[in-house]
């Protein structure tokens, strides 16, 4: 009997909106996004990152008031907004996923219901996973609240929690219903969190858009002093490039082994672990990007001067491009960060595929890695960072 072939394609479409203060009483963007189901109102559960609530204790009340005011437009809260743990604590296991599922069951949220998630990338990942599982997928509206989440982590089609000792081990590919990048949330970030998203913008510019990279280099002194307009442009451009990759790159659900958006990440993920998360993701990405830029220069893919100009741009934004964990070595004297290569290869399914710039703003993948060459690049980065840290000698008259 011949096999039966089933073949179909599903089209996804979602928008990233840029706004400020979406829960102000007269702001109606969210009311346009939440669609009533026939004559029934759009019912929503709302989850808010605890740090966002700490910075804006009145936010749950504002959300409540906003829904009350806009009820005539057919939107309704299914329950009071809930505060959830921020950062990796919330995606440590399935606890938060089960909590959201229980609440959805208690309030009888049907499959047309919405889950509105307000938080950093970690909260978006964990509550997003819950939303993707309940009734096999509720509509999720994300409001990323960190620069990194607005420029990168909150925009994609993935969600996950950590499990079985591995980061992002349990998750799904589920496109959101909509995303709102609300600039007001960024006002409350401390300097490190504010800076975090910048390295992801450099990452995507280096491999995809030389013009954007020029803009970032020119804007570095402004970004260093928290210029909100410069950050707004960075987020908008970075969001564009990330979404363009998902929509046009031909592999939105990452079935192949090429992961261009993970440029600089093979070492960054390892550095986060080696520092026991003292280094944040964005800080580790800045170092990972610096290492791979010097490696690409050593291979002749970009000029050494180009690599150093980008390193200087990252440093001007406030990133430290050397960290002591880079000096950790195993019993054979090999830098421990290199274990990140094996983990990356395993994650990709056995074959190493590293995105590398091939000329600034362009990329092609590498399938082999020269550890001796990397060793020279790591030493060069250490010297570069030491030179940069040294105050310029006083000029004598
Ligand atoms: N799904 C994806 O495609 C994807 C892509 C990249 C990264 N990620 C994930 O994103 C996470 C990192 O995201 P992140 O960089 O946004 O960090 P985060 O979510 O860990 O947040 C960092 C800290 O900032 C706090 N915070 C969030 N918003 C705030 C605000 N407006 N004011 C004050 N404090 C605030 C959080 O509570 C947390 O303590 C990681 O778990 C990573 O795995 C997911
Ligand atoms: Zn990243």
Image (tube, rainbow, N blue to C red):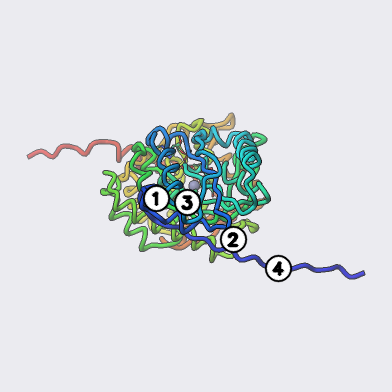
Where residue 1 sits in the image (x, y, percent)? 92, 69
Percent x, y of residue 137? 64, 51
In space, the residues marked 2 and 4 are separated at their CA atoms by 28 Å
Question: What is the x, y in percent for residue 85?
Answer: 51, 33
**Which tag, 2 or 1, sits closer to the chain's start?**
1
First-in-chain label (3 vs 1): 1
Can residue 23 be seen here?
Answer: yes
Residue placed under numbered mark 4 in the picture:
8
Mark 3: secondary structure: helix
CA distance for labels 2 and 3? 15 Å
Pointer 2 with pointer 4, Cβ within 8 A: no
Q: Earlier in the sequence, mark 3 or mark 4?
A: 4
Q: Does label 4 point to a residue whose CB lies under 8 Å from ligand 1?
A: no
Q: Which residue is mark 1?
A: 22
Quickly name the residue at label 2.
Answer: 38
Marks 3 and 4, Cα distance to the nearest angstrom?
38 Å
Residue 71's label in the rendered image is: 3
Check the image and report above or below for 35 versus 393.
below
Q: Nearer the viewer, residue 322 or 248?
A: 248
Closer to the camera in the image, 60 or 329? 60
Depicted 300 relative to depicted 272: above or below:
below
């Amino acid at each position: 009997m011949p096999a039966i072939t089933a073949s179909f394609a599903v089209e996804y479409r979602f928008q990233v909106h840029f706004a400020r203060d979406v829960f102000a009483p007269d702001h109606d963007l969210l009311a346009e996004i939440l669609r009533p189901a026939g004559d029934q109102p759009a019912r929503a559960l709302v989850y808010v990152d605890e740090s966002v609530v700490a910075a804006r204790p009145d936010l749950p009340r504002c959300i409540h008031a906003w829904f009350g005011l806009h009820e005539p437009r057919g939107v309704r809260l299914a329950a009071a907004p809930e505060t959830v743990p921020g950062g990796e604590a919330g995606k440590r296991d399935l606890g938060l996923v089960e909590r959201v599922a229980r609440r959805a069951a208690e309030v009888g949220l049907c499959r047309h219901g919405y889950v509105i998630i307000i938080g950093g990338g970690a909260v978006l990942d964990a509550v997003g996973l819950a939303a993707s599982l309940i009734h096999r997928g509720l509509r999720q509206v994300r409001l990323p609240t960190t620069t990194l989440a607005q420029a990168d982590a909150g925009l994609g089609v993935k969600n996950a929690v950590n499990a079985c000792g591995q980061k992002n081990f349990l998750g799904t590919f589920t496109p959101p219903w909509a995303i709102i990048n609300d600039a007001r949330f960024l006002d409350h970030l401390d300097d490190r969190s504010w800076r975090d998203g910048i390295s992801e913008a450099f990452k995507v510019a280096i491999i995809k858009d030389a013009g954007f990279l020029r803009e970032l280099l020119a804007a570095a002194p402004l970004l260093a002093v928290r210029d909100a307009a410069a950050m707004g442009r960075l987020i908008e451009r970075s969001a564009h490039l990330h979404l363009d990759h998902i929509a046009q790159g031909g592999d939105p659900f990452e079935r192949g082994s090429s992961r261009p958006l993970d440029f600089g990440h093979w070492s960054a993920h390892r550095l986060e672990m080696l520092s026991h998360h003292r280094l944040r993701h964005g800080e580790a990405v800045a170092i990972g990007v610096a290492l791979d830029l010097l490696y690409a220069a050593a291979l002749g893919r970009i000029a050494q001067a180009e690599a150093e100009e980008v390193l200087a741009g990252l440093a001007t934004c406030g990133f430290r491009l050397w960290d002591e964990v880079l000096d950790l070595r195993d019993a054979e004297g090999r830098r421990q960060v290199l274990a990140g290569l094996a983990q990356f290869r395993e994650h990709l399914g056995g074959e190493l595929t590293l995105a590398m710039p091939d000329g600034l703003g362009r990329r092609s993948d590498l399938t082999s890695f020269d550890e001796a060459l990397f060793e020279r690049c790591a030493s060069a980065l250490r010297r570069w960072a030491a030179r940069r840290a040294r105050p310029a000698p006083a000029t004598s008259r």
